[in-house]
Amino acid sequence: MMKKFLTAALGLAIVGAATLAQAQAPAAAPAAAAAPQQAGFVKMVRGNVQLLDGAGATRTAVPGDALGAVDRIVTGPDSSAAVVLRDNTTLMVGPSSRMDLKEFHFDGTTRDGGMLVSLLRGSMRMITGLIGKTNPDAVRVETQTATIGIRGTDFIVQTDGQP
């Protein structure tokens, strides 16, 4: 009888200590609300490639870097970068280019999403992923003089950057 009592008392003490520790711990903020959703990643870098995030912070791009939903890619002369987005869209940014990923959202479960890419100068090749295949109207590319609605799955855009 005493053994059962001690086992029950010890079990209650452990549960009580865990509950007390949990009550005293500071509440953690939800991670999804604090961190912006990653749009994709840098797959390849050749030469001088810079990433500029939505907050204005600039960093040198390296393969594996996360790309946010509103990042800018800037390539120097004789430089290029390849980026793969979460829907498997591939963007190849050519030399002396400036490209903004202005909007990107994608739900892998429903395959619903959209993107807006702005090529300010230089060249870019896009091979569309799931968004372009399931809802081509949700993929747009802007240049200084035109907005392009995507109907194909592989194309090249080039602009001189002059308005």
Image (spheres, grey):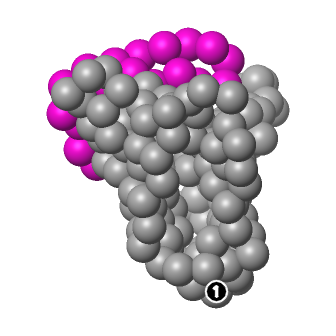
Vertical placement of residue 157 versus 143, above or below? below
Q: Amino acid at mark 1?
A: Thr
Which residue is rendered at x = 64% and y = 86% of the image? 134
Q: Is residue 82 above or below residue 139?
A: above
Q: Quadrant of residue 28?
A: top right
Image coordinates for residue 114, horizontal then vertical, percent: 71, 64
Query: Crowding near pointer 1: few (<14 within 10 Å), some, many (20+)?
Result: few
Q: What residue sits 67% from the left and 18% below the top? A: 55
Q: Position of residue 42 (x, y in %)?
A: 35, 43
| Residue 38 shown left or right of residue 136 in the figure | left
Picture layout, residue 36 above or below residue 134 = above
Q: Quadrant of residue 26?
A: top right
Q: What residue sits right under mark 1 in the picture?
A: 134
Residue 21 visible in the current orientation: no
Highlighted range, magenta: 41-63
Please state, as top left, top right, bottom left or bottom right, where the C terminus lies in the image.
Answer: top right
The local secondary structure at tag 1 comes to helix
Q: Is residue 87 left or right of residue 60?
A: right
Q: Residue at image x 68%, y 37%? A: 144
For this rendering, which residue is in front, 28 or 144?
A: 144
Q: Is residue 43 left or right of residue 55?
A: left
Residue in the image at 49% along x and 71% along y: 128
| Image position, residue 32 (x, y; %) | 70, 46
Instruction: Tell me the quadrant of the picture where the N terminus can be found.
Output: bottom right
Q: Is residue 42 magenta?
A: yes
Residue lying at the far bottom in this picture: please name it: 134
Q: Residue furthest top?
A: 57
Choose top left, top right, bottom left or bottom right for residue 137. Answer: bottom right
Whether residue 60 is situated above or below residue 100 in the rendered picture: above
Q: Is residue 149 visible?
A: yes
